[in-house]
Image: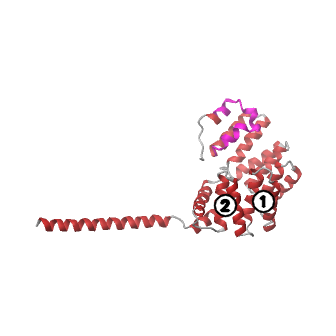
Amino acid sequence: MNQHRWIWLAALLAAALATALAALRHTGGARDRLLPSPEDAVAQAIALLEADPMAAQRETQSAVRTAAVYAERGLIATAEACYALALQYHREDNPPAAEALYKRAIALRPDWNRPYVDLGGLLGRHTFGRNEEATEALKRAIEIDPEWARPYNILAIILRMENRLEEAEEAALTALRLDPEDIASNNNYGNLLLTQGRLEEAEQYYVKATELNPDHPKPYYNLACLHSLLGHPEAAIEYLRESIRRSSMLRGDSVFDPHLDAIRDHPEFQRLLYGEEESDSE
């Protein structure tokens, strides 16, 4: 009798274990189905980059990271996947890896303008002495799509850095003509005007940039610099606070920025940089 009872008990336990394992397998399968395929992950990243080409928003950053992981693991090797991985390396301040992958994306899809634009930005803004290569990449992007504002905008930045201000203004105004509501074009034209000492004009474009995207930190930071130059310490501190609240990385930019020298000894400036201040981004 006892032997039969143990046999039945063992059978019941085996059945229960099998049911539990089946449930776990089912749950795991459902969880796996929630993960996007490599193709879907890359497509989602590219779609979000259409509206947020600088990957300033967290959703775009997350999508680019996901696509980059698939590309890095060799699960997808399309031009779009190489581009997503290049963007991630670019964001992580790894120019050699980013450059190689932008060029790989171009080789795979030479008629796609997006890798040319970011390659131009990388070479011109993050790699010393390669502005000619950067300009060539940007001009190629313009040839592919002369109605896209972004390559003109980045070209304007590179020309401004070379102190070719008339050419920079022409490129910047072309970007604004093509897309008057583009936050980057408004913000960067403000930077050009500030460089020329046209501070009141610059303020108009920075303010418009904050209105176009209230969550973007850079226009607030630039307004802080502008008001510091104008001798408005309270306004400068408030705009700096708003920029750091949106991106704590701007603390580092503030440490050595000469545009903020006029407020550097202000107690609130010291607290913003070296004290505890809430930030909405990592």
Label 2: few (<14), some or many (≥20) within 10 Å?
A: many
Residue 219: x and y in percent read 72, 47
- Residue reaching furthest right? 166
Residue type at mark 1 is Pro
- Asked if residue 254 is among those painted magenta in the image, a careful observer would answer yes
Q: Is residue 189 left or right of residue 11?
A: right
Q: CA distance from mark 2 to mark 1?
A: 15 Å
Residue 135: x and y in percent read 82, 58
Q: Which quadrant holds residue 147?
A: bottom right
Residue 15: x and y in percent read 27, 68
Q: Is residue 278 left or right of residue 104?
A: left
In the figure, 17 relative to 163: above or below?
A: below
- Asked if residue 166 is among those painted magenta in the image, a careful observer would answer no
Q: Secondary structure at mark 1?
A: helix
Residue at point 65% right, 44% down? 249
The residue where tag 2 is placed is: 49
Residue type at mark 2 is Leu
Residue at point 65% right, 55% down? 89
**In terms of depth relative to the viewer, which is nearer, 260 or 68?**
68
Q: Is residue 235 left or right of residue 23?
A: right
Q: Which residues are magenta?
A: 247-271
Residue at point 33% right, 64% down? 20
Looking at the image, tell me whether mark 2 or mark 1 is earlier in sequence order: 2
- Look at the image and tell me in which quarter the N terminus lies: bottom left
In the figure, 271 relative to 128: above or below?
A: above
Residue 241: x and y in percent read 66, 39
Q: Is residue 3 left or right of residue 197?
A: left
The residue where tag 1 is placed is: 151
Residue at point 85% right, 44% down? 196
